[in-house]
Image (cartoon, helix red, strand yellow):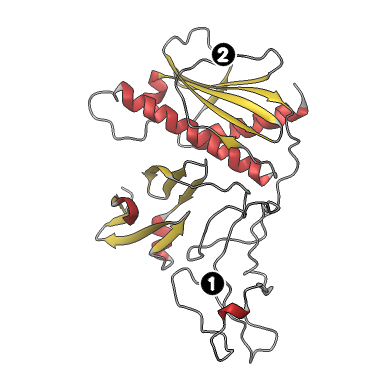
Amino acid sequence: MSLKLIAIESLMDEALIKSLDEFALERISAPKTHSDMLKTRLLFEGAGMKAQAFISCSQSFLQKTCPLPKGDADHASAVLKDWLGEMGNLILGRFKNRLLAHGVTIKISAPSFDGHASKNPNAQSIVSWYQIEDSYISLECLIEGEIPEIGEALKQTAEILPGDAIYRLNDPLNTTPSYDIISKIRSGIENHDEDEDEDKDDDGMAPEPRQTLASVPVVKAADPSVEKPAHKPIKILFHSQVQLHLLTGVAWSQLDKLCLHFSSGLEYTFCPKTLLDRGCSSLEVEDLVLQFQREGDMIRASIPKYNMHLSKPSRVA
């Protein structure tokens, strides 16, 4: 196996394990019998390569890991199929984000369940098997074309804290992709925007910064008697694809892990309780506004656009 393929395998295995980090997955060789496996397929391409990823799970594995509440009866087959597709989105989305950190951009298709694909004899193959007790999951990837070189991850120089605004993760079309967090609010470096003059009032004076939950703190200049204007909200730029990001899934399996999944493969995980503790009651992600509030011993998260409301006990028994 080439070093490039080993690097891809490592990132994919890490994406699988972290997508199921609540469970103690054990790496194993392929079992001799695995007849009750359900399979989903996702395609991804970019950087001169095309690939097919197959995620196969035993029904018992899906029953154990499905995040939906389970009653006396097992989950229905339709629920297991939906969970398998969502798991594929989670794993490939996390894999995509890891590649972005290394300067590699890919496009991912939606999950399909036909389970069949023509195998090019020249395709390079990756196969991993894991188990929970007597339940199995496998990840197989067939890659055609040139596998990109995976170098060192680009360094993130700024820290995002609750209360900082997070906006769209796209570069404008026909511009050089930027993969690093470009905000330097922690370093005290002033930003000079081309549209700075447009932000001034008619009298030539800059307007006072608006006080919002997502406003960025004012940074002191060298002269203590002079203050710099507040920075504009943080923007994180990861890739140059211009596309509409649609919310495809929401999971709140643990108090500190509210996850949003988008059609582009992007994934956000945050803790509403921590945000509320830091004074943040709303957050905008991919043009989607989320609101948080406390109702007695419950924490409530709402997405007004979809009239969606989720609640979780604020105390862990």
Q: Secondary structure at mark 2?
A: loop
Residue depicted at 42% across the width and 23% down the height: 61
Residue depicted at 39% across the width and 42% down the height: 251
Of badges 1 and 2, nearer the viewer stands 1
Q: Is residue 167 visible?
A: yes
Check contact, mark 1 vs mark 2: CB within 8 A.
no
Instruction: Identify whether 198 is placed above or below 38.
Output: below
Return the x and y of residue 173 as percentages of the image width and height.
63, 52
Residue depicted at 67% across the width and 83% down the height: 221
* Quarter of the image where the N terminus is located: top right
Q: Is residue 314 visible?
A: no
Instruction: Identify whether 218 is placed above or below 272.
Output: below
Mark 1–mark 2 Cα distance, whole angstroms, equals 52 Å
> Residue furthest toward the left?
72
Q: Amino acid at mark 2?
A: Ala
Instruction: Identify whether 124 is placed above or below 200.
Output: above
Q: Amino acid at mark 1?
A: Val
User: Residue 216 got which mark?
Assistant: 1
Q: Which of pointers 1 and 2 lies earlier in the amino acid sequence?
A: 2
**Could you classify mark 2 by the number of other residues whose Cα lies within 10 Å: few (under 14), some (14-19), or many (20 or more)?**
some
**In the rendered image, which residue does mark 2 sit on?**
30
Of residues 102 and 28, the one nearer the viewer is: 102
Return the x and y of residue 211 as percentages of the image width and height.
45, 77
User: Residue 13 got which mark?
Assistant: none
Residue depicted at 24% across the width and 60% down the height: 296
